[in-house]
Amino acid sequence: MDTVSAAGREGELAAVAAEWARTIAGTSYVPMELPEIEELLFGYAKQLFDVWRSEPFDPDRARPVGAALVDGHFTHPDTLAITLALLSRVLPSHGAAEPGASSRNGAVLGALAAGYASRLQERTFAEQDAIRAAAMTARQEAERAARVSEERFQAVFAGAAIGIGLGDTDGNILDANPALTKLLGYSVEEMRSRNVGEFMHPDDTQEVWALYEQLIRGDRESFRTAKQFLRSDGRGIWTHLTVSLIRNDRGEPEFQIAVIEDVTDLRQLQSQLQYQAHHDMLTGLANRALFQLRLQQLVAKPPAGKRIGVCLLDLDGFKAINDSVGHGIGDQVLVEVASRLDSALTPRGHLVARLGGDEFVVLLEDTTDARDVIAVAEEALAVVAQPVTVAGHPFAVTASAGLVERAAADSTDLIRAADITLYWAKTEGKDRWAIFDPQRSDREVAQYTLARMLPTALAGDEFRLHYQPLFSLLSGAPTGVEALLRWQHPWLGQIMPDRFIGAAEDIGIIVPIGGWVLETACAQAKRWASRFVDPLRVSVNVAMRQLTDPQLIERITRVLDDNDLRPWQLQLELTERAVIGSDREPLAALRALADIGVRIAIDDFGTGYSNMTYLRTLPVSELKLAASFIENLRATGTDLDIDAQIVRSIVSLAHTLGMTVTAEGVETDAQAHTLRELGCDTAQGNYFGAPGPPETIQRLLDDHLAHATMSGRGSSP
Amino acid sequence: MGGPSSRPSWAPAGVDLDRPSAARVYDYYLGGFHNFPADREMAKKAIQMWPELPLMMQANRAFLRRAVRFAVGQGVTQFLDIGSGIPTVGNSHEVARLADPSSKVVYVDVDPVAVAHSRAILAGDASTAVVQADLRDPDRILADASVNRLLDLDQPIAILLVAVLHFVATEDNPLTVIARLRDAVVPGSLLVISHASQDGQPELADSHQRLYARTPTPMTMRSQSEISDLFTGFELVPPGVVPIQQWRQEGRPEDSSDAAGGAKRMVGFAGVGIKGWTR
């Protein structure tokens, strides 16, 4: 083989490979760039030429080239066609002189084609097998997953506590789970013979079935609603129903799934709870919550001009019924009263509610003026006042009513106003109504406000004591002072005790205030001791409430010791009304105080109870005659003067019982003279000296002492 | 078509060999025999309508090869090949391994047969994994155990979405899907997209879309600008989004054996984006 022809042959092969690569480009997908393909095909071309020239000639050796083409992914039939056409053209040009050239061409190309076809067939089979195996694997996997999924679904379906039903779009029920069959009382077979439409309930809203139609048509994917069902036994149940649409592969509605939850018990419980929450269990009337709810609805956004009224009713002395005949009977009385109010007023469109205890309220939802609520109150009081007989006991029951009538827009404090008004009706004598009066309320609110300021006042040292001297009518000398409480308010100025003592008693702060008064007055008495000829006596006003203070005696003993006072130098003044109305406990305290020698005086004597027999049983040392007796005392010796006679009788009685008598409010010399004539022991009043702060009183005492010292004796001014 | 969430994950799709599958039709276009009569029937109809289809598919395949080589050239050797279809000649892992033997590839496809076949072929290959998942459910892909086992998400990853996004309908929010994938990868990661387009051949594209409506994966053609929008959050590498066969063609145009020069009509667009450090 000569090298020149070999080199020429290489060049020729390269040209063949280049043309081959270019012409088959794009017929099959091979992951190679053109130069790589050319290189590959160059090798194949060389092999083919070698086969062509092989001796002995063995064309079958061209078969592997055909197979290699398939392996290189030159799999498209067009690739083979182009290849054979190209090679049949180029092969004969090599050594065309040689004998049998064309037959060799045919044999080589035939073997190439056979090798190609054979390998393509193998590859086809192999890939088909592979994809079928893959499909089978995938299918098995899908079936396994479907089975698992089905099992899961079945477990959910069968085990769910919630009812699940499957139906087609015609409403035929296809399946129902055990929970649903139990819920509706039909077997699965019975369910399957039924249509969804048969579960229509007379109370279903149109909306429910409109939603259902939309779902079946495919206009909606699901809906949720509350719905009633009739069970096979005719019993009604309440459910929460959710219906969902299942579509097929083409997106058309195919199935419906209903999920049904029994909420009957829950609903009953809710309505029961709601009833209980809004009704009084004893009387069946609306309760406070429902009353307040209705009131809030009325006043929330009232139309202009809308007026409402409230009639707040409280039975008079109901506690006495309960205490005397027991709660059982008392409850029956309440039931009877409630029933009367209900039948008299509810038909008129008013809400009658029991607020608690023996307190009822009537709400008038549309009033013209106060007359409407007054009419209701009078009717209510009238029906209550009719005799009640319970368990053979006749009861005379009355009630008091507080009325409020005003624009609904202005109802913020409606209940409080009614409460205040009810209190007025009670204090004005019961068995009556009172209607709200804003001015009166304002005054009372002011008092209430004072009461709220009392603790601050005590802590802030706003209290002062004024003193008024007492003089002996016999000797004319000062015998002591009465301490009088004043409240020096930082911006309201001086407030007299009548404006706040009641409130202080109500809130209990009277005890520490009283303690302060006691200590301050006794300390003052110690400072003034030297200004009196005889040991002075200090009078302090005491509220009954203070007598319930268990430390009172201990405190008084300590205060007396601290100020070098003897017990009889302290006089506690109580009002007649307070002493008479008291329970045993304060009286015991009074006796204990009297036992240690403290003097007890009845203040304002003569203004309260006319029955004087109580005086015998009380440890009283002194009576203080009310100023009203003194006011009318005129000339001495006129036995026709009724007031003088009364005073004389009182003095006489007091002395008989071992008590002294002090006259209050002595304004004139004539009064002082008459009182002395009548045997009265001591006196106080503007004639002797008005109440004043300690420095003023001290001057007065000093003046008196100086005068007495100069004249050598005590003297009246 | 409902989204992937229309069926609970434990309720599987069936395997219906009487319906053509995009993966197997694609295999047929590329001269493979991993297909069934229904696939071939559909492919032949499509080719009748559009004779260049096999060339287009070859162009797509060639783009995949160039893009994978480009990625390895950028130092990215981890690949998440979503919509990988039937493994055929010139698979991503083969191309990548030629360029860098340490390359790792996770194939993802929704077609259970394609996945089963891929698993059969790649059984025992520790550097590859096959996941059956829907591109429209990127969270499921990202949460997959083999994805996390094989790929290091702290290193750049090349996300291959080659000839698959046109199977994601607009109502399935392809931008959201891509954003989710983008947020899961570190800067320096690549997004590789090729996408069928109706640009220049609206009538053909229409009938082609209708043909694919019969498959479980109907087709949504997109315009060049719509395809460019898919790279939101990535910086396009030159030459940008261009006709598939023109993207970083190697050598002279007439040298390509991949039908790049052969396909006279446009077949779609391709591009590669890189996730920047500034985002």
Image (cartoon, coloured by chain):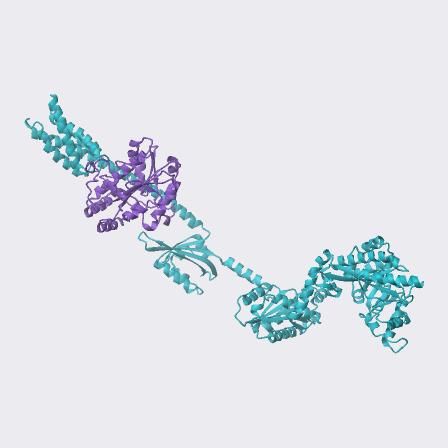
Relative image position of residue A647 (x, y in whole percent)? 87, 72
Nearer to me, A64 or A671: A671
Left or right: A504 in relation to A200: right
Horizontal and vertical percent for residue A31?
24, 35
- Reply above or below: A637 against B195: below
Residue located farthest toward the right when viewing the structure as drawn: A712
Instruction: Tell me if B107 is positioned left or right of A45 in this view.
Output: right
Residue A138 visible to an observer of this rendering: yes
Instruction: From the viewer's perspective, tell me whether residue A336 is left or right of residue B169.
Output: right
Above or below for B6 versus A611: above
Residue A459: horizontal and vertical position, in percent? 72, 55
- Look at the image and tell me in which quarter the C terminus of chain A lies: bottom right
- Looking at this view, is A209 or B208 the one in front? B208
Q: Which color was chain A given?
A: cyan
> Quadrant of residue A375 in the image?
bottom right
Residue B232 drawn above or below residue A412: above
Find the residue positioned furthest to the bottom.
A640
Please say whether residue A171 is visible from this viewpoint.
no
Q: Where is the N terminus of chain A found, in terms of image quarters?
A: top left
Quarter location, residue B140: top left
Viewer-proximal residue among A23 and A58: A23
Residue at 43 percent of width and 49 percent of height: A156
Give the colour in which the image draws chain B.
purple
Q: As drawn, is A465 to the left or to the right of A242?
A: right
The residue lying at 11 percent from left, 23 percent from top is: A4
Q: Position of residue A447 (x, y in %)?
A: 69, 65
Instruction: Give B223 or A387, whichever is nearer the viewer.
Output: B223
Tell me how many marks there are.
0
